[in-house]
Image (spheres, rainbow, N blue to C red):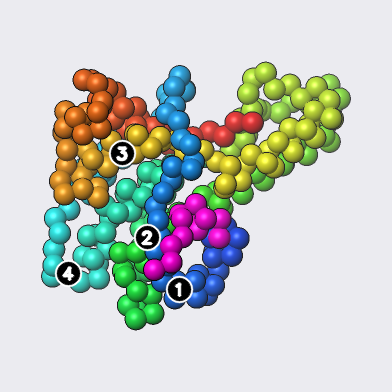
Amino acid sequence: MEKINVIDFERQVVKKYFDEEEFLKFLEEKRELVLDYSKLSLKELEGEDLEIMGEESVIDYLEEVSSIIPNQEENEEDFVVQNLPVVASIAFNYLREGVAYLDVVQEGTMGLMKGIALYDGEKYGDFENYKKYWIIREMVIFINSKITDIKNEFKRFFKDKRENFGKEEHTHSEEDGEVYLKEEDLLPSLEAIDKREKLMERTIEFGALKNRLSLRQIEVLNLYFGFGAERRFSIFEIEEKLGLKKGEGEIIFEQALLILSTMEGKIFL
């Protein structure tokens, strides 16, 4: 079976597979989706300001999903529930800057439901492979739409800066809606404004966004909640399995959970 890497699939979603008819034609190719996120070169956040209002419901949701028991006799609604651990796990890889984890999960679940409703085994092949396409597609479309809104906020900010440049009476909040600029960003000239706007155009796009969780943090989360594993693992077992030092697994898990529980990651230029 021909394969496609998830990063390449994401690019295609942004370019043309947001159109459902094009997407369904693509699914008929029955290509195996390879969930390899290693090319993102993710790093664990250090010294980041994570003191943002958090969502306690994230840990509650993950605990609830991890307790789902497989059931062979299921209707369509039960079938959706049975696949929620897959959505929760994939969403760890789509906690991009500017989005909240539970929002990504919600969109992925909507994708799962659409996929189940339209599934035709003869047309689309193996369901386990097929469902991942739908889940990831909806997550990518959501994130791309979200950052488009953020980009438009920045554009309005820069337009306002140009129109009011040099006016002594003019004031503008540095935190306006989705727009966040660092304190040292004074934009002292029209040239500086143009330069910063070009930087915004390059950095605020789907392919350039960083994931807020590292690959190691994702691996620890998946093992702890038993996603994609035969059972849940204790922190001690995770440390042994991953070759971590005593106490290191707990630190990684707590940091990952804190990142998951922040409402949204701010995007800075």
Q: Residues within 10 Å of mark 2 (few under 14, many from 20)?
A: many
Q: Quadrant of residue 70?
A: bottom left
- Cα separation between marks 4 and 3: 30 Å
Helix, strand or loop status at disc 1: loop
The answer to whether 147 appears left or right of 134 in the picture is: right
Helix, strand or loop status at disc 3: helix
**Quadrant where the image shows the N terminus:** bottom left
- Cα separation between marks 2 and 1: 15 Å
Given residues 173 and 2, the one toward you in this image is: 2
Q: Residue furthest bottom?
A: 122
Relative to 146, residue 3 above or below: below
Q: Which residue is mark 4?
A: 74
Q: Which residue is mark 1?
A: 29
Q: Which residues are magenta?
A: 1-12
Which residue is drawn at the image coordinates 17% and 69% (left, top)? Answer: 74
Of the two numbered discs 4 and 1 on the same chain, state the one appearing first in sequence.
1
Residue 183, position as x, y percentages in the image: 64, 20
Of the two numbered discs 4 and 3 on the same chain, state the one appearing first in sequence.
4
Residue 148, position as x, y percentages in the image: 61, 49
Which residue is drawn at the image coordinates 61% and 46% (left, top)? Answer: 205
Q: Which residue is mark 2?
A: 132
Of the two numbered discs 1 and 3 on the same chain, state the one appearing first in sequence.
1
Instruction: Mark 4 and mark 3 in contact? Answer it, CB < 8 Å.
Output: no
Q: Nearer the viewer, mark 2 or mark 1?
A: 1
Q: Nearer the viewer, mark 1 or mark 3?
A: 1
Residue 20 seen anywhere in this rendered image of the structure: no
Give the amino acid type for the residue marked by disc 1 in the picture.
Glu
Q: Which mark is residue 219?
A: 3
Residue 132 seen anywhere in this rendered image of the structure: yes
